[in-house]
Image (cartoon, grey):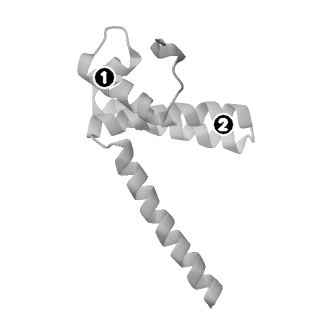
C-alpha cells in the first residue's frame, strides 16, 4: 500500500483530486475556496497566473517561469473541472491539431 502523497504525479491524478475536492469540499482547502467562489474567481486566477507566466518569461527566469506555469496549469485544471472539461477532451483537441500541423508541414514541403 502506498499513501496518496507517495504516488507518482500525473495530470489525470491531479484532475481526479480536483474533481474530488469539488464534490467533497473539504474545509480549509484552497481548491474548495475556488469552487465555492465560482467561475468568476477561477477565471480571475487564470488571468493572474497567465500574467505572472508572461512576467517571469520576459525576465528570462527559467525557475520562476516553471513555478508560474505550474500555478497556471493548476488553475486551468480547476477551470476544467468547474466546466466539466476532461483531460481526454484536451488530449483529443491537441491530437487533432497535431494531425493538422503534420499535414500543413507536408504541404509546405511539397510546394
Q: Position of residue 2 (x, y in %)?
A: 48, 13
Q: Earlier in the sequence, mark 1 or mark 2?
A: 1
- In the image, residue 43 above or below residue 96: above
The residue at which mark 1 appears reads as: 20
- In the image, residue 38 above or below residue 2: below
* Quarter location, residue 38: top left
* Quarter location, residue 28: top left
Residue under the image location 30 percent in, 22 percent down:
20
Q: Residues within 10 Å of mark 1 (few under 14, many from 20)?
A: some
- In the image, residue 74 above or below residue 109: above
Q: Position of residue 15 (x, y in %)?
A: 39, 32
Q: Secondary structure at mark 2?
A: helix
Residue under the image location 34 percent in, 30 percent down:
41
The answer to whether one can see residue 44 in this image is no
- Tell me: 72 left or right of 39: right
- Tell me: 23 left or right of 32: left
Q: Quadrant of the C terminus?
A: bottom right
The residue at which mark 2 appears reads as: 65
Question: Which label sits on residue 42?
Answer: none
Amino acid at each position: 500500500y502506498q499513501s496518496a502523497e507517495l504516488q507518482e504525479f500525473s495530470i489525470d491524478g491531479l484532475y481526479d483530486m480536483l474533481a474530488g475536492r469539488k464534490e467533497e469540499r473539504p474545509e480549509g482547502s484552497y481548491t474548495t475556496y475556488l469552487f465555492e467562489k465560482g467561475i468568476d474567481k477561477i477565471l480571475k486566477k487564470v488571468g493572474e497566473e497567465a500574467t505572472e507566466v508572461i512576467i517571469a518569461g520576459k525576465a528570462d527566469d527559467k525557475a520562476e517561469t516553471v513555478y508560474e506555469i505550474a500555478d497556471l496549469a493548476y488553475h486551468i485544471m480547476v477551470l476544467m473541472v468547474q466546466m466539466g472539461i476532461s483531460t481526454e477532451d484536451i488530449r483529443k483537441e491537441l491530437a487533432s491539431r497535431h494531425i493538422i500541423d503534420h499535414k500543413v508541414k507536408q504541404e509546405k514541403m511539397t510546394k
